[in-house]
Amino acid sequence: MIDNIGKISEEARESFASVGSSDKLEELRIKYLGKRGIMATLLKEIGALDNEHRPAAGKAINDARRAISSYFDEAKARLDTVISGKSRVFDYTLPAYPFPKGFLHPCTQVMDEIVDIFVEMGFRVELGPEVELDYYNFEALNTPRDHPARDLHDTFYISEDVLLRTHTSPVQVRVMEKVDPPVQMISPGVAYRRDADVTHLPMFSQVEGLLVDRGVTFGHLKGVLMEFARQMFGENRKTRFRPHYFPFTEPSAEMDISCGVCSGKGCRACKGTGWLEILGCGMVHPHVLEMVHYDTEAFTGFAFGMGIERITMLKYDIADIRLLLENDLRFLKQF
Ligand code: PHE
């Protein structure tokens, strides 16, 4: 038995000397010094020995136990200094760890880029309220209460006359009420619709544009928006205008750009059409101009509106709009 105790003690010394983590150290402590550990078991076995052998065995076990306790203490002290770094010499001349730097959200970057492009073309930035009167969101935009186009908007109503704006177009009206033509403005901001799936968010961003002056034609609209698309998406993308319907513009159109994934041949990203819709636009409806007392004989205008999340998705080929909200740094750091 005494030989065996010597062997156990030696084994323990080696194990404690090489242990590398606090978890492993705790395992070793339980194995040797725990209530049902090796030393406790040995002590119990003394009872089975002859009277004459007991004292020597008892002493050997107690000595071994004390030795193993000290191996444990040494190992613990060693691990503690490693963890707290006390054993490292601090070198003040080393370069610091790089400090993590923040960056703008991809949608904010795209919004800034869009605003810059139009500001450079002479558009002024105007803002309006997100909690809006029904009058500005619909009525003054040639969309009275019984108008079927209201169904397309899935509006959040606050009361009968107050709502969360469903688009940034009401800012057009607010600005035209205040200033005489010519007007050349854009309005970046948030809008709300009861809508949520892979391409729709209940709260989303838009940039609205409006230009009213003497002799403004659909040709001007096309020129401005084609130049915008060229700067935003590059020289190689084609554009086209498709007839569309908005109550507040006539004629109305949607503008598409050729798909960047397949260069217009047709693929999954463009659902086989070769084209991607990027915005709605049209010539301001005379009713809208009349509502703000503009002289419709003298003045015409064009307007457009685009979704920022949508443009961001197209620009970076993002399949699910919700990625833009989840704040997953693995996603965001790619921009
Ligand atoms: N307000 C329209 C929308 O949200 C976009 C638009 C703006 C269309 C201006 C034409 C003119 O869908």
Image (cartoon, rainbow, N blue to C red):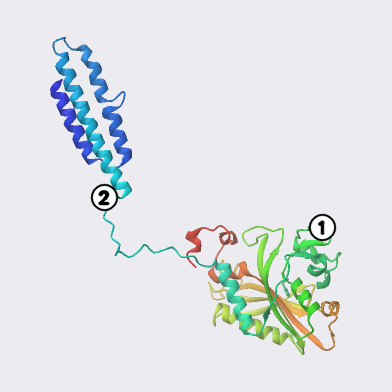
Question: How many neighbours does mark 1 have within 10 angstroms: few (below 14), some (14-19), or many (20 or more)?
Answer: few
Please give left or right for residue 252 compared with residue 278 in the image.
Answer: right
- Is the residue 135 above or below the residue 72 in the image? below
Q: Which residue appears at 24% of the width and 31% of the height?
A: 69
* The label number, if any, that marks residue 326 in the structure image: none
Total count of labels: 2
As shown in the figure, which amino acid type bears the numbered disc 1?
A: Ser
Q: Which residue is mark 1?
A: 159
- Assess mark 2: CB under 8 A from ligand 1? no
Asked whether the viewer can see residue 65, the reply is yes
Left or right side of 106 for 246: right
Across and down, in percent, residue 212 comes to: 76, 84
- In the image, residue 269 above or below residue 117: above
Q: Classify the position of the N terminus by image quarter.
A: top left
Q: Tag 1 or tag 2, which sits nearer the N-term?
A: 2
From the viewer's perspective, is 57 left or right of 160?
left
- x, y percent for residue 65: 22, 26
- Mark 2 touching mark 1, by CB under 8 A? no
Q: Residue type at mark 2?
A: Ser
Give me the C-alpha separation between circle 2 and circle 1. Answer: 68 Å
**Residue 40, placed above or below residue 327:** above
Query: Could you tell whether 19 is left or right of 108 in the image?
Result: left
Look at mark 2 in the image and give the residue it sits on. 87
Residue 118, position in %: x, y?
A: 63, 81
Q: Quadrant of residue 5?
A: top left
In terms of secondary structure, where does tag 2 sit? loop
Q: Where residue 37 appears, x then y in whole percent?
A: 28, 25
- In-front residue for pair 6/155: 6
- Name the quarter showing ligand 1: bottom right
Q: Nearer the viewer, residue 254 or 79?
A: 79
